[in-house]
Amino acid sequence: MFRRSLALIVVLTLALVGTSFAREVQDYSKTIDNFKQSSDVRPVFDSAYGYAVYPTIGKGGLGIGASHGKGQVYVGGKVVGFTSLSDISIGFQAGGQAYSQMVFFEDKRAFDDFTSGNFEFGADAGAIAVQASAEASAGSEGASAGASSGGSGGSQATTSYYKGMLVFHIGKGGLMYQAAIKGQKYKYTPLN
């Protein structure tokens, strides 16, 4: 019974976001705008060399979990390639979740590391969760929400790059213990 439940969760997670790798440029402007609404994220757009956008990452698990998402990589506000991420995890986890993610590249060296073909964050990497504001709406990319850091008067997130990269999440729905980037494997294909 446990194996059937696990298999069902993994299959549904992968089906949620699709396993095909897009080769056509998509309009991810709503997701990008949602992140730009956060006072924690907005300044990073001006200083970063480039970024990767994942409008929807699906994650599910029951003891063993999996996540998958696809996105695009930008430099100078223009799409330069396609990316996908996936991971498999073992440990305390139960549930399912969907979230958006952005990976910012501090400089060309970080961009080159990420786009070298296969990239994986180490065990000590982390992400900054940005809360959705009341401006949530439904769009062509699924449920979307404006981002805000929450609280009153100032930024609550500590924004520091890890090996030249900075990661932000916005939850879209579901309930799960956490959305971690540890062990996420990224693939990159240049736009041609």
Image (cartoon, rainbow, N blue to C red):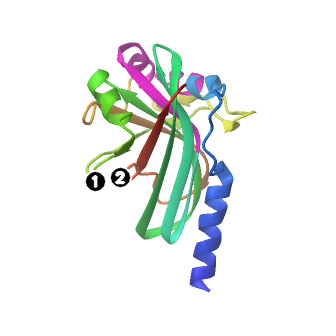
Q: Residue at x 44, y 36 (%)?
A: 168
Disc tally is: 2
* Local SS, label 2: loop
Q: Which residues are magenta?
A: 33-56
Picture quarter with the N terminus: bottom right
User: Can you give x and y, in whole percent of width and height, for residue 34 in the image?
Assistant: 58, 27
Spot occupied by residue 30 in the image (x, y as percentages of width and height): 64, 25
Amino acid type of the residue tagged 1 in the rendering:
Ala
Residue at image mark 2: 182
Is residue 158 shown to the viewer in this render?
no
Name of the residue lying farthest toward the bottom: 1
Q: Quadrant of residue 23?
A: top right
**Residue 163 lies in quadrant:** top left
Q: Name the residue located 64 percent from the left edge and 49 percent from the top edge.
A: 17
Q: Is residue 86 left or right of residue 23?
A: left
Report which residue position mark 1 lands on. Answer: 123
Is there CB contact under 8 Å for labels 2 and 1?
yes
The Cα–Cα distance between marks 2 and 1, rounded to whole angstroms, is 5 Å
